[in-house]
Amino acid sequence: MRKLALGSQGLEASELGLGCMGMSEFYGPRNDEESLRTLDRALELGVSFWDTADVYGPYLNEELVGKALKGRRGQVTLATKFGILRDPNDPGKRGFSGKPDYVRSACEASLKRLGVEQIDLYYLHRVDPNTPIEETVGAMGQLVKQGKVRGIGLSEVSAATLRLAHAVHPISAVQSEYSLWSRDPEEEILDACRELGVAFVAYSPLGRGFLTGQIKSVADLAPDDYRRYSPRFQGENFTRNLELVSRIEQLAAEKGCTPSQLALAWVLSRGGHIFPIPGTKRIQYLEENVAALDVRLTDSDLSLIDQLAPKDVASGSRYPAEMMGSLNK
Ligand SMILES: NC(=O)c1ccc[n+]([C@@H]2O[C@H](COP(=O)([O-])OP(=O)(O)OC[C@H]3O[C@@H](n4cnc5c(N)ncnc54)[C@H](OP(=O)(O)O)[C@@H]3O)[C@@H](O)[C@H]2O)c1
């Protein structure tokens, strides 16, 4: 596994990362023992760029990652996020804060839960509509000066917001959803990142599991699985999206790889500054995903994929309507 420069501030990360969110919430039952074994295996395979957030669990995912880090902090490029607030009485409700005082207190709390002295990449998870981005990033830059954080990142931001932020303090990475069925970043932000020397971290590169071909019916998901609330996993959208998956499955079979590997190889093919962070709690899936690095897509494969999965191919928006508003445009 190669390590590549992540942005322009001296950070490095494995070319394939590991999304840890689903180990603690959103995608079916938790199994911490299995997740810890998967994190062990990830390090053996060189998948050392780990992604978590305070809001996953909430808090449980940072605590789990903290456990896995014990005794080997130096081997991991550790990324976490702040800025989304949960309501203990209503698990679906979200608030946002990028206020400087909150930036400082959220960072202290994450350092404690993770059991580390420094976070490698600290992201603002969502822009706070009530706090100017310059104020939030100014406070994040102070954390870098104090040595609590090595680099700063922004999640789901527009190119205009990235430029404003980058002028206050250099941004090392932008994280947004990017996959065969979520190609919005191609409009602006991928190019803006390339131009500014900012890494682009592609979250949900497997379409929250849909593009793997393993989810054939909503009944395959646990009753409390977040994806049941996602428009793309509902009703006629689900059925139409399965047609896309069957085209991906066919192409993968022709290439001698799995649909998951094809989906990841495609994201990797889109630019040297792009780091996919597929999520899994299972060793078997992790190993399968790592092998995507061996899949070579030719120019004719890529143009065929463009026909199979053009922009806007997905039926349904990528978040429920009430959450779409939190994406910075
Ligand atoms: N910044 C943000 O707002 C944001 C939003 C969402 C996610 N993220 C980050 O991005 C990471 C990755 O995204 P994601 O987890 O949403 O989506 P993903 O990587 O697109 O898909 C994860 C799902 O795919 C399944 N899977 C993984 N590899 C597989 C394989 N080879 N075959 C079959 N199924 C496979 C996993 O199953 P199992 O669960 O059974 O292992 C899981 O249900 C998250 O963990 C999180 O750290 C960030």
Image: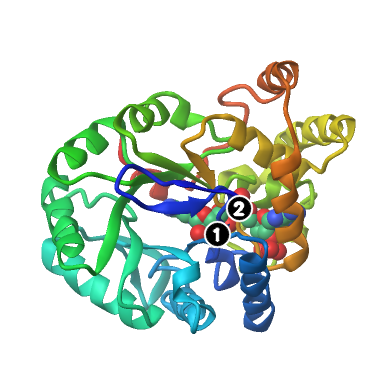
For image coordinates 26% across by 49% down, the residue present is 127
Residue drawn 69% across and 78% down? 34
Q: Amino acid at mark 1?
A: Gly
Residue under label 2, please give it. Answer: 278
Q: Is residue 303 left or right of residue 116?
A: right
**Residue 234 at what x, y percent from top left?**
65, 47
Task: State yes or no: Cβ of the residue under disc 2 lies below 8 Å from any atom of ligand 1.
Answer: yes
Q: Is residue 104 above or below residue 167?
A: below
- CA gap between label 2 and label 1 equals 5 Å
Which residue occupies the foreground of this view, 239 or 111?
Answer: 111
Crowding near the residue tagged with mark 2, few <14, some 14–19, many ≥20 C-alpha atoms within 10 Å: many
* Disc 1 target residue: 19
Residue 275 lies, in percent from the top left, at 51, 44
Q: Are marks 2 and 1 in contact (CB under 8 Å)?
A: yes
Whichever of callouts 2 and 1 sits on the residue coming sooner in the sequence is 1
Q: Helix or strand or loop: what does disc 2 sit on?
A: loop
Q: Is residue 297 above or below residue 6?
A: above
Which corner quadrant of the image does residue 20 belong to?
A: bottom right
- Compared across the picture, whether 260 is left or right of 138 comes to right
Left or right of 296 in this view: 280: left
User: Does the beta carbon at disc 1 come under 8 Å from ligand 1?
Assistant: yes
Residue at screen point 48% across, 53% down: 13
Percent position of residue 287, x then y: 75, 58
